[in-house]
Amino acid sequence: MSGHKQLRIALRNCGVIDPENILEYIARGGYMALGKILDEMAPEDVIDELKKSGLRGRGGGGFPTGLKLEFARRNEGERKYIICNADEGDPGAFMDRSILEGDPQSILEAMAICGYAVGANEGYVYIRAEYPLAIERLTIAIRQAYEAGLIGDDIMGSGFSFDIKIKYGAGAFVCGEETALISSVEGNRGEPHFKPPFPAEKGLWGMPTTVNNVETLANIPSIFNMGAGRFAEIGTKTSKGTKVFALAGNVNKVGLVEVPMGTTLREIVYDIGDGIVGGKKFKAVQTGGPSGGCIPEQFLDIPIDYESLKEIGSMMGSGGMIIMDEDTCMVDIAKYYLEFTTDESCGKCTPCRIGNKRLYEILCKITKGEGTEEDLDSLKELGGIIKDTSLCGLGQTAPNPVLSTMKYFYDEYLSHVRDKKCPAGICSSLTRYEIIADKCIGCTMCAKACPTACISGKVREPHKIDQAKCIKCGACFKACKFDAILKS
Amino acid sequence: MIKIKSFNELKELKESLNAQREHIRIIVGMATCGMAAGAGEVFDSIAGEIMRQGLKNVTVVRSGCMGACHSEPTVEIVKPGEDPVLYGNVDSSRAKVIISNHIMRGEIVEELVLEKNYETASLGEVEQ
Amino acid sequence: MKKVNVTINDIKIAVPENYTVLEAAREIDVEIPTLCHLNLHDLKAVNRSASCRVCVVEIEGRGTLAPSCSTYVAEGMVIKTHTPRSVKARRTMVELLLSDHPKDCLVCEKNQRCELQKLAADLCVREIKYTGAQSTYEIDNSSRSIYRNLDKCILCRRCETMCNEVQTCGILSGMDRGFETVVGPAFGLPMIDTMCTFCGQCVAVCPTAALTEINQIREVWDAINDPEKIVVVQTAPAVRVALGEEFGMEAGTIVTGKMAAAMRRLGFDRVFDTDFAADLTIVEEASEFIHRLRHGGTLPILTSCCPAWVKFFEHQFPDLLDIPSTCKSPHEMFGTVVKTYYAAKMKIDPEKLVVVSVMPCLAKKYEAARPELNTNGMQNVDYVISTREAAKMIREAGINFVDLPDEDFDNPLGESTGASVIFGTTGGVIEAALRTACDWLTGESLEKVDYHQLRGLEGIREGTVKIGDMEVRIGIAHGLGNARRLLEDIRSGKSTYHAIEIMACPGGCIGGGGQPYHGGDEGIIKKRADAIYREDQGKAKRKSHENENVIELYRDYLGEYYGEKAHELLHTSYQKRELI
């Protein structure tokens, strides 16, 4: 490996080929894996190879892909299905979209490979309707693959047939959960069901079904091209290959990065991301989206894999990675994520529907300065019970942002409830702006900037803020050139 | 598009496609993020400039995301036999400069170059 | 069934492998509380949404608690049902539900009948631990039958299971998401604007007061207390085998005599029996069947006693409107007869008559308001109250029901045969019709009155009855999902039946939406069915056409069976309705 921190496997063709031209994909080795498999491998060998590669689901859970396919293969069914989960919904995550927009053929090839492995002849790509460009390119890709005889009937004369259709998701985050997704494909309300039965036993229309996320699929042709053994050399003991992250937040070089498993957060933030914007202090990194947690500085050097992230209260998730600097209020961040999950909860089970709402309400209370120390106990206790009792992964992980910030930034919570202060100055109800008379030269800049006209004073005389009218927008603070406004 | 009827036909097609690669490729990152940053205009401007200059051995490619969200729109120049060069923060006028300097005169526009900080896994051949 | 070994609370036990943890725990007398769970095995009504999370238990080796209602046992499974962790989680679930639930238990329709209330008491919830936003929705009392107060909905989804899976009506489903999730008709339509059949099965299974009946007790009291009115009450066959449950009597206790006595004490001026009208229905329907058989009419003939079923086919099978019998349902026939024949006979101004039906059914409330069920400008039936409402009136009036003496119905509309009694259970109407049709077609009075092959709780049953040298093929369905299958066969030409009986509610009227809550115990429904057949057995006359009051009615007033006057008064028509 060269000195580069990034290694592109899933993204190998993104930004390299024209996604609307199947010939460019073929020129880069596209469909060679499928061709080889159909030509010389038995379905069981395909599954063995995937098991050997150590590939695990990239959509969040990290379940071994080969094993998943094996279950579906073993279960009897009149028909079987392969579903590509392209219902990417984590705030700030766009790995799957990028792959579908940049290399849609790789997904089709991988679905056909999975189909062959489990004995399925039909596949669906469940993609959110908010991804019009990805849908357009995927539609073109499917058409071209049919025309080239690389999907459809009797692929490359092998006798194996595989059809692929697109299903649009209507923007429900929970439909990323496989049982909810299947329900939605069937035309029902996108709601998770209790497992078992797992989709591998009773999935789409009651038939054995394998659901794989886009990034997982994107890896599959490469595994057969480079060899499972070589793939398994990349990464850590338990987590093989690479992981794509959508690097965002207060980092200089935001972007889509793909790194070998085991890369440290520090390498991602500082080497690839080029450090924190404005040279500020790193505070935390949020991984795993709304299901994940916030990781503090002390863990910057742990090698990232499924297990290590879980151990420190976060998770791999689909790959959103949001970097936060010292000006971030962790209570506010927890509130933000919880607001997202309470909105996106399907409302089916009690802990997620009502429990998370109550957690959110407690956080609102705290950020308004009305919280008590008992509220902190409630957060911890209720959060734990929600994790323990929710029906699906969404509910089971929804309290993670709260619990992980409480674990690592408890002082900040205490400041909010005990001192009624927001140390980062984000929670407006807890923030106060005052003009330091000694420093104010009466330039009137603050008064001009104030949207509520609550700053008064004569020119060249110290000004004053009417606290009753102040909405804590911070405009005066930014406008003052003499550091005469104190934010506390 | 011809229908590929066997694995051998696929292999032959791949070889013939790679044998033709004599062109300079100008790849424009045109995923949703690139488009939002103005990659569409950049593409039009590049395609227009190629026409105007009458450049025959250049292909302009609409591609997906190159990963450098911090410097969209991005354009990569791939000349046969040379290392690819990735440009960031390209707009219509900068695109013209890239064409006249890099494509036509072989001079890299250093101030727009982004460090390419990744390696692509060798796609290898199918293990025989 | 293969058995597997599990350990529950340190007790080792072998249970069938298709058992849930909940069922396995019952084997060692451990009751795990449930809320959303509903399992009427034989009626194929199972709600396994696993959504309330009240029944969670600890299973060794699992990271999170598992819902016992939907977790199946496995070899070697080690289960702990009442650990501090699971009990606390359980209590928290109830506390959370209560935090989004009105606290008006004292004045709630379901006070002391509410499963959430009971659960809160059982789990020693003694404070409203969590507070915050509460869902509020508009009351839907748009229909005559079902009252929806979604503020009280706990999203157990039982109503959806009944409406969608059992009845295949698809009126109720989850809408919106997160805290705003609610169960209701598409587009938030009021029930009256949907194709809801008002079968009331959603009400029958609702654990709280989110779904209850539209109560007409007040109107009935007002009529009773109005000196100008002569208030006539009739009681449906299925009421007499269930009403006792409301007063703590064993399910399946026959309380016909006490019921008649109670009605009289409530102040009704005449206490009659819908069973009389059931006999009347049979002679008309059997006549219609024979007429169709002999004159090449449309077959099969479908029974039309069940108003939910009638509305169902009007919406779903408008192309088949010519196959149901045109006979009005028994209580409508009864109302018609009261306001015509009886009024004339007793020289009463029919305008002064108020007909009240006590029914096991909520659809009867809707049916009573159907505009075509009107004779001489008067609705045939004025008010319908459910078995539950009747019990409420009895309690309100301070009547000690259990100790009441047995009394008879009034005459001349009080006599009934065993055939009419079995109307209350699935298979009963067709059996009653056969008893009459066989006699008439053979011209003999046959000994055979029990058609055991038509009885039972199987969703779709069929049988062949030999009448003379003709083989009559009978189909029976209860539950609208089963009815749909029979109807689809008719539509596609596959059906070979001569006659089909359909009842909308699982089990028939004994399992109606207006009956005392069975609380998920299908044994109660079975006991009611047994009681119905016992009542039939005990009757001196068991064939409808032998009912003296009925014979007298035709002789003195209606003339011929299935004749002109009978058509005018006892038959009705159906209309095509929209699918929404």
Image (spheres, grey):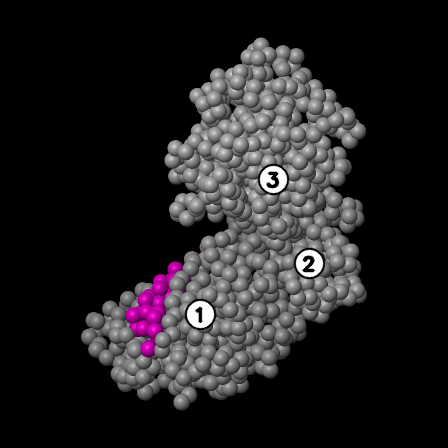
- Name the image quarter holding residue C365: top right
Give the residue type at disc 2. Ser
Decide: marks 2, 1 in contact (CB < 8 A)? no
Residue lying at 63% horizontally and 38% vertically, measured from the top left: C510
- Name the image quarter holding residue C478: top right
* C-alpha distance separating marks 3 and 1: 53 Å
Decide: marks 3, 1 in contact (CB < 8 A)? no
Q: Which residue is mark 2?
A: C68
Query: In x, y percent, where is residue A253?
Result: 49, 71
The chain ID associated with circle 1 is: A
Q: Which residues are magenta?
A: A130-157
Instruction: Tell if the residue under mark 2 belongs to the same chain as the one under mark 1.
Output: no
Asked whether residue C5 is drawn in magenta, I would say no
Q: Is residue C145 above or below residue A194?
A: above
Q: Which residue is mark 1?
A: A120
Q: Which residue is mark 3?
A: C450
Q: Main secondary structure of the magenta part?
A: helix
Q: Nearer the viewer, residue A279 or A267?
A: A267
Residue C358 visible at all: no
The chain ID associated with circle 2 is: C
Q: Is residue C49 left or right of residue A382?
A: left
Query: In x, y percent, where is residue B112?
Result: 38, 75
Q: Nearer the viewer, residue A71 or C416?
A: C416
On the rendered image, what quadrant is the C terminus of chain A found in? bottom right
Q: Is residue C428 left or right of residue A23?
A: right
Q: Secondary structure at mark 1?
A: loop
Residue lying at 32% horizontally and 69% vertically, measured from the top left: A146
Kindly identify which numbered label has been placed on residue C220. Answer: none
Q: Is residue A230 above or below residue C85?
A: below
